[in-house]
Amino acid sequence: EIVFDDYGNSAVKVTLTDGAAARFASITESNIGRRVGIVVNSELITAPQIRQKITDGSLLIKGSLTKGEADRIKAGIGK
């Protein structure tokens, strides 16, 4: 889903399945302080630092994304 942050920048909201959310919670818990790469169509889009365990299965990929970049990320994730 394409959403907008507090500054009007495009962002992509990703909602994981229950199984994927549990795996992601474990991965983020074990890697606090490290970076996780977000790869779409073999291209590294962003590599944010994990600040805390993510347990709700909801991710927000944001930054200075244009609407076109957000659309491309959404399309790549949806495959």
Image (cartoon, grey):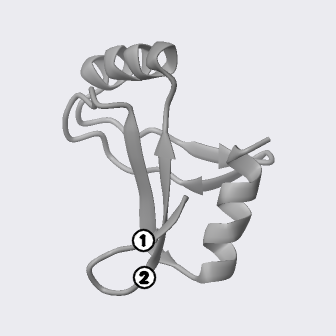
Which residue is labeled 2 in the image? 9
Which residue is labeled 1 in the image? 63
Which amino acid is tagged 1? Gly
| Quarter containing the N terminus | bottom right
The furthest residue to the left:
52
Relative horizontal placement of residue 25, taking residue 67 as reference (left or right): left
Report helix, strand or loop for mark 2.
loop
Is the residue under label 2 in contact with that under label 1 (CB below 8 Å)? Answer: yes
Quadrant in which residue 70 is drawn: bottom right
Report helix, strand or loop for mark 1.
strand
Relative horizontal placement of residue 65, taking residue 33 as reference (left or right): right
Mark 1 or mark 2, earlier in chain: 2
- Dot 1, crowdedness within 10 Å: few (<14), some or many (≥20)? some
Which amino acid is tagged 2? Asn
- Dot 2, crowdedness within 10 Å: few (<14), some or many (≥20)? some
| Viewer-closest of 50 and 78 | 78
| Quarter containing the C terminus | top right
Look at 24% across and 30% down and name the residue there.
Answer: 32
- Counting from the top left corner in percent of width and height, residue 4 is at 41, 75
Look at 19% across and 35% down and name the residue there.
Answer: 52
Quadrant in which residue 29 is drawn: top left
Report the Cα–Cα distance between label 1 and label 2.
7 Å
Look at 34% across and 74% down and name the residue there.
Answer: 5
